[in-house]
Amino acid sequence: MRLLPRARREALFALYDIARAIDDVADGPGSAMERRAGLERWRRQVAAIYEGTPDDPVALAFRPHAHAFGLPRAELDALIDGQAMDLEPQKFDEALFVLYCRRVAGTIGMLSLPIFGASGEGAHRYALALGEALQRVNVLRDIDEDAARGRDYLPEPRDAFAARAAEKLAAARAMLPGLDRHALRPAIVMGELYATLLARVRAGRRLSRLDKLVAVLRGLWASR
């Protein structure tokens, strides 16, 4: 995020804050019914962002950026739909997991593109591919925590899932030629960071500060 000019950086911080707030409802305390009601409250806040004035301070702070950058409301609604999928324990098959990734991660990519200053069908495909890849790595990183919540996202054995995550990261990277890599620099750096994270998770190791620095430098080089 800090790679961006101030106006774009502040918009991305505001996007992060609203996505975090919605996610915290789904992962927070209370019954599934209470959390579902919390998500519906956020759905009303999203409507107010585009149709009026929200009363939640996070939504209110996000509102000017949504209008300034033309951020699509449908993606925020889809993000809430994705968080709602976490309210009931369920076994994910591949199709359901891909849908889940589109809703909880692809939405963030699609909302980030206008903030980055990137557009076009190629950029859209890249954002969705990278979003799915990052979510797969997140699942592997948080597998024990998710299990404690009764969530099992893996549609296949862990090793096969990890291999597929690596394939998805490589597929996203392969889309970069011909795209505006300067505009996509934060996403490219994130992709490289997650590629390193995936390697460390598969090896049963933590991500070190040196790992992070090398990944960032690799991403900056790839986005030049």
Image (cartoon, rainbow, N blue to C red):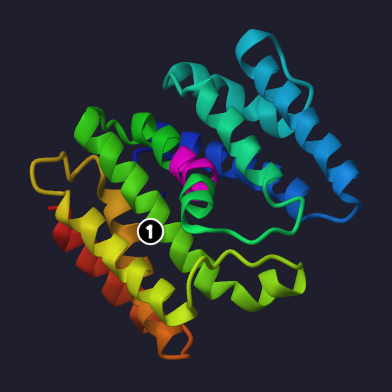
Give the residue at mark 1: 133
Circle 1: residue type = Ala
Asked which quadrant contains residue 215, the reply is bottom left
Up-down: is 66 above or below 188? above
The reply to whether the magenta stretch includes residue 104 is: yes
Q: Where is residue 146, by image quadrant?
A: bottom right
* Residue 103 horizontal/vertical position (percent): 53, 41
The magenta span reads: 101-108
Q: Nearer the viewer, residue 123 or 86?
A: 86
Q: Nearer the viewer, residue 216 or 7?
A: 216
Residue 157, placed above or below residue 130: below
Q: Looking at this rendering, what residue extends furthest in the bottom direction?
A: 204
**Residue 174 in picture, x, y percent from top left:** 15, 55
Spot the residue most to the left. 178
At 70% from the left and 43% from the top, the residue drawn is 84
What residue appears at the point 23 percent right and 68 percent down from the top-left corner? 217
Q: Residue at x 67, y 47 (%)?
A: 85
Residue at image position (76%, 36%) is 39
For mark 1, does the 10 Å Cα neighbourhood hold few (<14), some (14 to 19), or many (20 or more) residues? many
Residue 3 in the image, given as x and y percentages of width and height: 33, 50
